[in-house]
Amino acid sequence: MFSQIIRVTAIQIIAVASLTFVAHAQPRALPLAPIRPVVDDYFGTKIADPYRWMEDMNNPELLSWMKTQDAYTRTVLNEIPGRQGVMKRLTELTNAPSARVSSVRRLPGNQYVYLKTNVNENIASLYIRKGLKGKEIRLVDPQALTPANGQPLAIRFFQPSWDGKLIAVGLEPGGSENLTYINIYDVVTGRKMNETIERITHGEIAWLSDNRSFFYTRRQQLSPNASKTELYQKSLVHRHIVGTSPDKDQVVFGYGVDAAIDVVPTWFPRIQTFAQSPYVLARVETGVGGGQAIYLAQLPKSDQAMHKIGRLAWRKICSAAEQITDAAINGNDLYLVTHLNTPRYKVIRTNIHSPNVATATVVVPPGDAVIGSSNMAGADALHIAEDALYVQQLNGGLGQIQRIPFQKNEKSSIVKLPFDGTLTEVQADSRVSGLLFSLASWTKAPRFFAWSSALRRSDDLGLQPRGPYDELNNAEVREVMVKSADGTAIPLSIIYKKGIKLDGTNPTWLNGYGAYGIPTLPNNNPVITAWVEHGGIYAVAHVRGGGEFGDEWHQGGFQATKPNTWLDFIACAEFLIKQRYTSSRHLGGSGISAGGILIGRAITERPDLFRAVGIVVGLSDMLRFETTANGVPNIPEFGSVKTREGFRTLHQMSAYHHVKDSTHYPAVLLATGINDPRVDPWMTAKMAARLQAATISGRPVILRVDYQNGHGPGVTKRQRIETYADGIAFLFWQLGHVTFQPPWPGCQD
């Protein structure tokens, strides 16, 4: 039974709630944005863009327009009856446990490192403790730090040194990922080291065995006249020695470093180190869901020689064409995950001294289960512990771990989990036996477990305090298959309160994503609980473009096949109506980030199908995405306007260019964060302006702007609760929930 749904990562959970924003009737009308058409010629096809002027985020006219829009939206949201009640309930649900714990790591010596937000706090701090019963020490409290721009700080990532005495911590102000920087802390003294490393985009920290230096990937220093599209290009891997200036860090890998190694400007390089191994892997990611070129090198054996690492002698393991998506080293063995002619992936092993991918031994053959993590099919699946290789999988929508023992007299087995659900934060250490993992389901809140290879069982770590609402007991979960337009069966998850009548009147919230091979998985959170408690139906369409069934599912909603993503979503909406869960008058939809393509094209194809939708930090103008800093790295996923076929593909998935004048569109709440580096805020502004000018339904199209947030990472607890409250209140208002109807004339139709 397919028991997975929207896999909501930190970015997704926040955004998903945001996309719920929808409105019904506005007290007063806002003036429409000025239209100043620009016409582009794409291979003989002329495309008009009425709001090109909005693409300059330094334009005072745009900034003033956005502030006016947000102020109006804030007024509308605050006047909805029931919003304050939802806010109070979400706060109660969020604060029900005495703390929220995440990112748990276990090091040798029974040392634990993790993030924790106490009930009276707004953001997570970094803690360490010796043993599960040992004294808990707060090492980094972001609330005690003051960023230069005065915006709230959040810990985005952390990585302890192999001996656990130092920790590199990535800090992010106001959700602005481009401003992320690294501080280094001494665990024993709690002291912050003097240096700060800036221009960090990804948290790829790889400590060396000297425990005083690490590899990290850094963006190039752009000149003042450089194009913004160059921001994420030509990244380089540096080596930093603790206690020295980052300006003197040695460049060891990346674009233009080694003439014998081809690294294209748009590719992302990183280096991976392994405990107790003198070997390192350099991995060059060619694009989301694509293969990686992988290189192997051996480090100096002595600490003295390590301190003076020169040019590393890299040996090529594979090219991107061999479709390798994950790699790990244990002793003399190199383990690799590939989807070459194997859409659900397989694990192979080759000797590190004479590596040969073509003749490698198959360790985990292809089967029904998809090899990969909850983040992405094929990625982060390999976990090396002292006793075994643990391979994370997705089987029929449920998380699964296969254990491949290093002792040859032991057989491979499936780890018995405490309950069926979604596996996240799986973590192992090659110096410690067993592994840690977080497990959740639609009706069970996340909990952290340790699996013991000696006892062959999983035990609750006890780090996450239990709360009174950890179990959603009064709810039913249905997993069904829905036929899409081409006959493909699409999994649909439906959660609702027990005893609900299927009479077509239930407010229903349908979510979808469908991109990058990311699966959407079950996860219980305050948003779902509050929605279901109020009598709403919560549903998730597992559309193509995601990773539920491996690479074939991703390819089914990829570039030229992208229309399947929104057609699958439409089919699931029609199923909910046909089966009397709801009706179009009571049906809402949402999509975040790349899910903006899904929801945007769903309403431009079938505006009659939805009463209200939310588009949060959503991609909408796909013909202009390539002009942004993050657009170029995303060409492998969506295509390029620089080719005739690429233009046709992108135009087809561009909701902004499919909005038609004089159309009865649903109510739409669009949301953006002013610090968003992934989907520039002007894209959301353009979509809002276009819908406001085109709709004749009388239902509102409103724009919400968060001036202390970006794409989602780094959001505070307060921001998250406010976002959720806005979304739930707006959806219930527009979908006809009696408790949320304002006393404004015309709010019922």
Image (tube, rainbow, N blue to C red):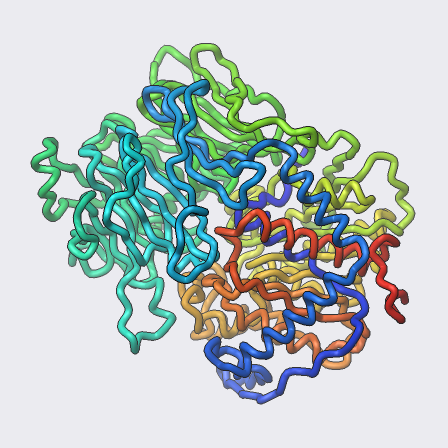
Whether residue 234 sits left or right of residue 474 in the image: it is: left
Residue 340 sits above or below residue 443 on the image: below
- Residue at image position (61%, 60%) is 616
Q: Position of residue 550 (x, y in %)?
A: 53, 43
The C terminus sits in image quarter: bottom right
- Residue at image position (49%, 51%) is 713
Can residue 589 be seen by looking at this rendering? yes
Whether residue 204 sits left or right of residue 605 in the image: it is: left
- Between 231 and 663, the one lying in front of the other is 231
Q: Position of residue 436 (x, y in %)?
A: 46, 26
Tell me the quarter of the picture where residue 48 sits: bottom right
- Residue at image position (12%, 38%) is 306
Can residue 395 be seen by looking at this rendering? no
- Residue at image position (81%, 69%) is 25
- Between 309 and 653, the one lying in front of the other is 309
Q: Position of residue 709 (x, y in %)?
A: 52, 59
- Between 213 and 28, the one lying in front of the other is 28
Residue 646 sits above or below residue 395 on the image: below
The N terminus sits in image quarter: top right
Residue 570 sits above or below residue 213 on the image: below
Whether residue 272 sits left or right of residue 643 in the image: it is: left
Residue 611 sits above or below residue 311 on the image: below
Q: Position of residue 88 (x, y in %)?
A: 72, 46
